[in-house]
Image (cartoon, grey):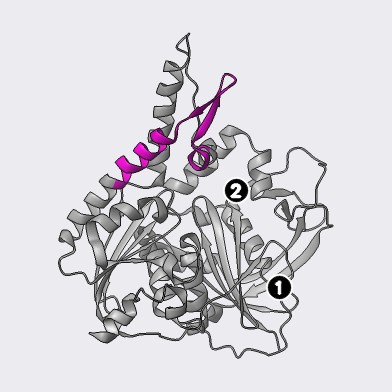
Amino acid sequence: MSTPVYIGNDQGYYGTKVVSRANGKFYKMFIRNMVVPNRVGEITYNNDPHNIMYREADGDREWFCGKLAVEQSGDDELFDSHKRRLFSPTWFREQEYLIMFRVSTGLMLQGNNEPVVSVALPTDSYIDYKDELKRRLIGKHTFEVKQGNLPYRKIEFEIKKENLFVISQPMATLFHIALDRDGKLLNEDLFIQKVSINDLGFGTSDIETLHGETIIKRQSFTSRHAMLNVYNLLSKRLLEFTRTADAENNGKEYPIWSLPRIVNSGEISFKGKTHDVSAIVQECVREVGSNLVEEVWQRLDFGDDITYIILTGGASIPFKPFYRERFGDKLIFAEDYGIEAQFANGFGLCKFSQSKSKAVPVKDLLEAAATIQQEFTVPDALSEAMNKKQQTPQQKIKNK
């Protein structure tokens, strides 16, 4: 009998975030969401497991994945991939999506393990495309993966119909908070309240409001404001800044995919000099964050009849102060529940896989071996996940 491994696979605009549970332990993995064909032939590898190559079989075309793909691709290739991923609700039809799904899922498996997988679609795409996505992923997957300077290794797994679940991305975070580490309902009161889940990503901000476990009442919209807007605004402001810093008034254009490093460091190098642009970065975040929260405030009718606003997603961290200022104690921050915000959907999907699976775990499960994974611990009780002086939202509900 094969051993079930519970996997939550959250393929986003910027990266693929995967969370799995095997033998009572949780693992997380991040792979930069980029796939390009190998056009350079033989290359020299170092021993970095994040340098990933994919092929169907020996002699077939090779593909660079993740960090290696970003390094080996041209600017036009990056732009084309990002644009298709950002603006197409049917991105999952692309070959790159399937390759990234196979690689990220396969690296979480070992031996004859049986994957029980949950994936998610954006709110606006979920109803229209969930069945098509299932058809795309169900079945046998056979391919080869090379990491670092190790030789290619064959990976095989089968996604059975009964072992694949598709839900909307914001719902994944709700399950992250509402289910315990074993996928069991932690507090059903959370499903009784009216809750708005705000999933702030790089390209879209999905807001889904529900009332009841079966989504009796549902409001959803994809905001025009997201982290991409910060980057677009920052790109324009940096061009203006470099023009003023240049005696010849020749500015420098910074493409979107070059900005994460600048956002993190707050510095740019221009004509041999380092400039502090942290104030420009902060102003761009403030402008977009204020507009985002104002739209949410209006669309949710000021949140008067909403019990909690759940904030999640990789872009939730910079926008959190604006949400806190506007919604106060109604705000639940997904990162307070034992894992970084960008992995909240993946963790919720992993828990959802456990809650829906009929598979019976086998005790003698080998631990996942790929070094790209990172084991992390999950508290048994929510009270352990937060400061003892701070009461969790679920405790507040229970004490009412």
User: Mark 2 Cα within 10 Å, few/some/many (few <14, many 20+)?
Assistant: many
User: Mark 1 Cα within 10 Å, few/some/many (few <14, many 20+)?
Assistant: many
Quarter of the image for the C terminus: give it: bottom left
Judge from the rendering whether residue 217 lies leftward or rightward of residue 205; answer left or right.
left
Residue beneath disc 1: 368
**What amino acid does circle 1 point to?**
Ala
Residue beneath disc 2: 34
Residue 288: give x, y in percent of width and height.
32, 43
Residue 162: give x, y in percent of width and height.
53, 81
Identified at 73% across, 52% down, the residue is 53
Question: 180 or 8: nearer the eye?
Answer: 180
Identified at 70% across, 49% down, the residue is 63
Residue 334: give x, y in percent of width and height.
41, 66
Q: Which mark is residue 183?
A: none
Judge from the rendering whether residue 213 lies leftward or rightward of residue 159; answer left or right.
left
Judge from the rendering whether residue 29 lies leftward or rightward of residue 133; answer left or right.
right
Q: Earlier in the sequence, mark 1 or mark 2?
A: 2
**Looking at the picture, does residue 150 appear above or below residue 203?**
below
**What amino acid does circle 2 point to?**
Met
- Say what secondary structure mark 1 lies in: loop
Quarter of the image for the N terminus: give it: bottom right
Can residue 213 be seen by looking at this rendering? no
Question: 95 or 308: nearer the eye?
Answer: 308
Region of the chain picked out in magenta, as a range: 262-289
